[in-house]
Amino acid sequence: MRKNRQEWGVGGASACASGVGEHFRIQSKDHSLLYLHSLTFAAPFPGPSPVPFSGHPESQPTTTMFKSSKESDRRKSYLFMSVAQRLGQLYLDKLLPLEEAYHFDRFHSPSLLEADFDSKPMVLLMGQYSTGKTTFVSYLLEQEFPCMRIGPEPTTDGFIVLMHGEVENVLPGNVAVVDRRFPFRNLTNFGNAFLNRFVCVQLPNEVLESISIIDTPGILAGEKQRVSRGYDFTGVLQWFAERVDLIIMLFDAHKLDISDELAEAIRSLKNYEDKIRVVLNKADQIGTQQLMRVYGALMWSLGKIVTAPEVMRVYIGSFWSKPFVNDDNSKLFEAEAMDLFKDIQKLPHYTTIRKMNDLIKRARLAMVHGYIISTLKKEMPMFGKESKKKELLNNLQNVYQKIEREYRVSPGDFPSIPKMQELLQGQDFSKFQNLKPKLFENLEQMLSKDIARLMFMIKEEEAAAAAAAAAAAAQAAAIVEETSGALVMPTVTL
């Protein structure tokens, strides 16, 4: 018999009061309680509740994260911040100044916002059209949602972000990107052609209390993909990939052909392979022998595109609410679905670690970028700047090697040479900043000391959360025992 999603332990999430942070109580298949704590951690030290950043970005000359008007107040409140908030403060104090000095946003990624650190875990779904992405979302939420269209033809023509809300609401893209509660402000860089195909849907759904889900358009084949969209589709995918916690890539068991456009989209996710999970959907429509061949063909096709040394995790199943067409492998499908939903369940618990990992990767890239820009500035002469610029661009590999020797930078930290050559082509090297040692010293301190302290704080918060969960479970067990004891009828001996 087909089991629904709640029996696998993904839904029915309800807030559970406790003394430490927020927890979500989830009923599993065997009716035991699984506790997942949300992004909002409790303060590890006695004192007031965690305080958000203060100030308004509108009052600053730039659109980056706002800066506190009173440095002393910021330092006092820092003690009582959560780990996620301290990450944001470290970015604001030690990484953002270097990014602004060397124009990191022009070459790599826009500056991070407050909402990037406070947002719930996000799951991105991608794949070719008619692979079951929207159906998967509906199955996970156990309800339909606004803007939802399902069919064998390309139906979802935009990016739909599903988030929790007290009432059902649909926010157009131009409204969602200016709302400070959401981490989407930097999507304005992709223009109105994209924003007209971007919506944010808020639903009073229990699953969305702990995660947000992003449904994407089906990837087309041929000229339609490159021309008809009107915006940089792979660029948008890459923007989301940098910020989401999990990427679910769906394939139809009957359509395993990976088009050039899909291959290009997968390549745009380079450096985020650890977030990718592959789902071989609609597997109930083929027999066991065919399924083995389809699985092998999928792994072979992915092996030619994904260059990661690890084998990608592939989940096999049929993710919709209808019964299996062929139930010969029903136990396999149920076990695979349980593994996938367990991965999703873990997201709220590991989201702070993920944000920390992404911030470290960003910091290392920003440091190397600063070395590149300052070295190019140093090499520029007083006269003959254009000819020197062409020489430096043609010999960018030599510049990389010089930086590697002088600053002891790992070769794996450098950005792609062709990409940097293309981006540097339109820049005036004479206007670049010289090396500012203080900025690099602050960043080194963040990576070597501050992050280590936050790791210790995470362990303390996890211990506190585990203790609170154990206490809540013990209290629930006591109530059940007391209730069951009250219902026992006394035995009467005649």
Image (tube, grey):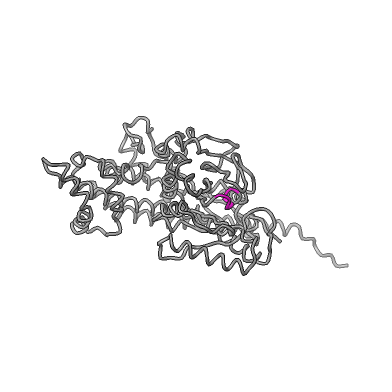
Which residue is more in the foreground, 332 or 491?
A: 332
317 left or right, relative to 263: right
Q: Position of residue 421 (x, y in %)?
A: 27, 48
Which residue is more in the foreground, 261 or 142?
A: 261
Stretch in magenta: 129-134
Q: Quadrant of residue 473?
A: bottom right
Asked if residue 130 lies in the magenta stretch, the reply is yes
Name which residue lies at 32% across and 52% down.
Answer: 450
Q: Quadrant of the N terminus?
A: bottom right
46 left or right, relative to 342: left
Q: Position of residue 330 (x, y in %)?
A: 66, 64
111 left or right, relative to 150: left
Residue extending furthest front? 223
Which residue is more in the foreground, 82 or 212?
A: 212
337 left or right, relative to 124: right
Which residue is more in the foreground, 380 or 384?
A: 384
- Tally the numbered discs: 0
Q: Position of residue 129 (x, y in %)?
A: 55, 49
Q: Vertically, is 430 above or below 452? A: above
